[in-house]
Image (cartoon, rainbow, N blue to C red):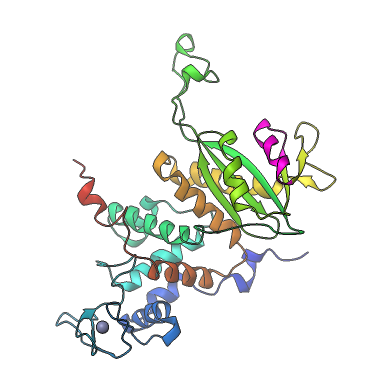
Amino acid sequence: MTQHFLLSKAAKTLSLAQVFRMSDSEAEDTFRRVRWAETKGAPVCPHCGGLDAYECRRPNGSLRFRCRACGKDFTLTSGTLFASHKLPLRTYLAAIAIFCNEVKGKSALAISRDLGLAYKSCFVLLHKLREAMAGEYKDRKLGGEGKVAEVDGGYFGGYVKPANLAENRRDRRLLKNQSGKRQCVVIIRERDGNSLPAVFKAESHAANFIKSRVTHGTKLNADEAGAWESLHKNFEVARINHEEAYSLDGACTNWAESYFSRLRRSEIGHHHHVAGAYLLRYAQEASWREDNRRVSNGDQVHRIAALAMSRKPSVDFSGYWQRHKTA
Ligand SMILES: [Zn+2]
């Protein structure tokens, strides 16, 4: 029997124990090599692009660089998603490692217990990691001549709790008894390739998105839902009627279903509640995890750290708790 990837040695290249054994300077070196990969860790001035900068630590030991060209100071994280970080770099690396190791997602509350940090810091940190992952989705196109992709939709959020007494219960299938907050995640997933999620009010709103992101010549697979009828004009579409079979003559949406399985388990098992505004971010996180499920955990940590270090400070999450004061 072939061994499952996650059980293999190749899957485990970075452990939390290794991260915690790192000295401060080793953690700094790791982030330097991630941030300035082209110069093998030598600092590049974010103000002028100068390559001649020297270390100039603050009296408290925190690492600063000073650019010989423009004279300005900068840190390892200046101008990145981790700008103005308050925690030691090792803690960020540990948080990313924990986040990667939990293949169906990690709740902010759980990571705050793991690392002894405030829940609020972890909530923001995890959202910044999702924002970093989202960077890979901005211009993503899927498919191509001879490629096969699947599309499917799944509904999330807007749960209406049934009333306690049977006499007060209402038919929650009727529109008038729903919350109006339910949203549809639509996934496009190339077989043996990448995936791309988006969020809509209903499955039927997704056709233009699919047409704009799937390359001409791709063979699509979809279920029998009426929402996919218009795709036939642009693509060859194989339809599978799930009342008859899950897979027939090569037509199936099993790749899309396994994506939804992961997203659903992350919602039910880890996050319990996903706020509507952030549904896309959780959908992208699940997609990233699905696409990278055969990548070693060490490489995943490096990828996410590199994505975070190549992005500008977060618009949504810099100073989030100053703007969202709670009692
Ligand atoms: Zn400079």
Is residue 275 visible in this depiction of the protein?
Answer: no
Q: Which residues are magenta?
A: 222-235
Instruction: Mark yes or no: residue 214 visible.
Output: yes
In this rendering, would 230 be left or right of 304? right
Question: In the shown orientation, is residue 325 left or right of residue 192?
Answer: left
Q: Is residue 300 left or right of residue 82?
A: right
Q: Quadrant of residue 207?
A: top right
Quadrant of the rendering where the C terminus is positioned: top left
Q: Tell me which residue sits at (64%, 34%) in the image.
A: 227
- Judged from the image, the quadrant occupied by ligand 1 is bottom left
Q: Is residue 38 above or below residue 261?
A: below
Residue at 28% across, 67% down:
83
Is 72 or 84 nearer to us in this picture?
72
Q: Is residue 57 left or right of residue 236?
A: left
The N terminus: image quadrant? bottom right
Name the spot of residue 53 as percent of width and height, x first. 27, 89
What residue is at 58 percent from the left and 35 percent from the top? 203
Q: Nearer the viewer, residue 86 or 5?
A: 86
- The quarter holding residue 95 reads bottom left
Residue 6 image position (x, y, % from top left): 62, 64
Query: Residue 139: x, y in percent?
Result: 52, 59
Quick check: is 74 in the magenta stretch?
no
Give 120 or 4, whichever is nearer the viewer.
120
Location of residue 271 in the rendering, given as x and y in whole percent from the top left corner: 44, 45
